[in-house]
């Protein structure tokens, strides 16, 4: 079991820089480079060697997992992608015949995986409207899965209410914290059992990696997650793990700039007559603002808004010069997309998911204004 307690006096900007780094050794690098090996010297009993075969453990992962554990306040297990992390939670928490209560506004990949679990393993699935959550929604469930803020609708779930209802019914709680990250809210401290993130997004932040992780405080759940990863082979490559650890040092700076940009853009859009339905949890007029302000420390880089129709949305995206049309979110480059093009989300044809990057806010606002003028 690794230690994940860190001094409470350290602030996030310091914690992300030092997270997971080994003790100083004369002549050694601050962060050891990636170890490229599938097998390690392992004479005698396998337990006599710290590493034997990469599917079972790897030194580069362990440095990054230690960093994630320190930031999450629980033991983190790294996976090859966010979806692999979701699958691991479903795999260790659910058995045939169990009931999964899942937010109807959760990531459509999680909902799709839940449907596959239903067909393959006989898991019963109940979709729950999280903005209108009722404790009775968890009756008979084994696991509740939700995302907050949700993607792409940006609704915020009342975590304390969900956790309380789950505890009263013996239900495990899993929360997708990708949009906010553990710097904006710490699910494990709020009583959640599984804190999951797609590290592909804001945590890595450069739109060049696929990774995910799950953090837990329960040692048994941690052991089961590691066993699941070993048996399914849902492992990260050493280069990806090392690059993610390297990127982690700038997370606080990146996220602060992205959140500032997101709020400024949301405020600007809310005052434009061509735009309707602006959603951002940090916007004082947003339906989720009061709850978000109570349980979040910052509000994330993602916002949503609607233009008149599909044509208007596509003209806006085509006219943008700095904003790149792409899926995913959380990168240093500002991106946007007409989300309905994928299907699977309850959004209109003119709805745009917008991920604020780290560019100068004046430049972004000028770009958005000229693109709106062409819709």
Image (tube, helix red, strand yellow):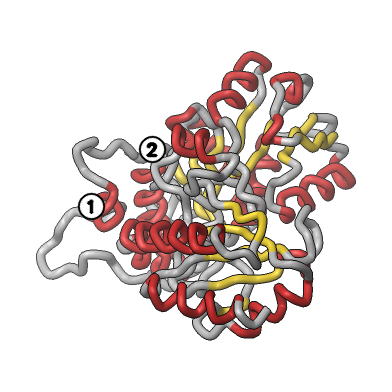
Q: Quadrant of residue 256?
A: bottom left
Q: Is residue 65 among the parts visible in the rendering?
A: yes
| Labelled disc at residue 220 | none
Left or right of residue 112: residue 83 = left
Left or right of residue 94: residue 149 = left
Residue at disc 1, secondary structure:
helix
Bin the neighbour count of mark 1 within 10 Å (Cα to Cα): few under 14, some 14-19, many 20 and up: few
Q: Please report the residue visible at 65 percent of the width from the left and 71 percent of the height from the top.
A: 337
Quarter of the rendering occupied by the C terminus: bottom right
Residue at disc 2, secondary structure:
loop
> Circles 2 and 1: CB distance less than 8 Å?
no
Please tell me whether residue 154 is drawn above or below residue 348 in the rendered image. Answer: above
Quarter of the rendering occupied by the N terminus: top left
Foreground: 365 or 347? 365
| Labelled disc at residue 73 | 2
Q: Please report the residue visible at 85 percent of the width from the left and 34 percent of the height from the top.
A: 124
Q: Please report the residue visible at 39 percent of the width from the left and 56 percent of the height from the top.
A: 64
Percent from the top left, x then y, of residue 265?
Answer: 48, 63
Foreground: 308 or 317? 308
Q: CA distance from mark 2 to mark 1?
A: 16 Å
| Labelled disc at residue 14 | 1
Bin the neighbour count of mark 2 within 10 Å (Cα to Cα): few under 14, some 14-19, many 20 and up: many
Left or right of residue 18: residue 320 = right
Foreground: 20 or 43? 20
Percent from the top left, x then y, of residue 48?
Answer: 39, 48
């Amino acid at each position: 079991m690794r230690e994940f307690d860190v001094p409470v006096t350290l602030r996030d900007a310091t914690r992300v820089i030092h997270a997971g780094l080994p003790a100083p050794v004369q002549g050694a690098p601050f962060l050891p480079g990636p170890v490229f090996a599938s097998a390690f010297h392992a004479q005698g009993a396998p337990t006599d060697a710290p590493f034997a075969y990469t599917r079972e453990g790897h030194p580069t992962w362990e440095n990054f997992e230690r960093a994630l554990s320190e930031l999450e306040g629980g033991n983190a297990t790294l996976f090859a992608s966010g979806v692999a992390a979701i699958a691991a939670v479903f795999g260790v928490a659910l058995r045939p015949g169990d009931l999964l209560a899942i937010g109807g506004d959760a990531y459509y990949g999680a909902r799709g995986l839940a449907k596959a679990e239903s067909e393959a393993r006989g898991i019963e699935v109940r979709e729950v409207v999280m903005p209108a959550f009722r404790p009775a929604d968890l009756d008979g469930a084994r696991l509740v899965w939700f995302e907050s803020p949700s993607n792409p609708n940006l609704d915020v779930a009342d975590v304390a209410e969900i956790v309380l209802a789950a505890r009263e019914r013996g239900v495990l709680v899993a929360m997708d914290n990708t949009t906010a990250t553990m710097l904006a809210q710490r699910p494990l401290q709020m009583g959640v059992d599984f804190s999951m993130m797609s590290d592909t997004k804001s945590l890595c932040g450069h739109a060049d990696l696929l990774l995910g992780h799950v953090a837990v405080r329960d040692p048994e759940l941690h052991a089961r997650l590691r066993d699941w990863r070993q048996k399914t082979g849902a492992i990260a490559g050493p280069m990806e793990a090392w690059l993610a650890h390297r990127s982690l040092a700038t997370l606080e700076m990146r996220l602060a700039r992205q959140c500032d940009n997101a709020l400024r853009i949301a405020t600007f859009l809310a005052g434009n007559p061509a735009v309707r339905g602006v959603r951002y949890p940090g916007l004082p007029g947003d339906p989720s603002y009061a709850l978000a302000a109570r349980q979040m420390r910052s509000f994330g880089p993602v916002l949503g808004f609607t233009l008149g129709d599909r044509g208007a949305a596509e003209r806006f995206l085509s006219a943008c010069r700095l904003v790149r049309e792409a899926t995913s979110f959380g990168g240093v480059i500002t991106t946007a997309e007409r989300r309905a093009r994928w299907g699977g989300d309850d959004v209109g044809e003119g709805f745009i998911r917008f991920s604020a990057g780290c560019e100068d806010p004046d430049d972004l606002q000028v770009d958005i204004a000229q693109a709106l003028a062409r819709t």
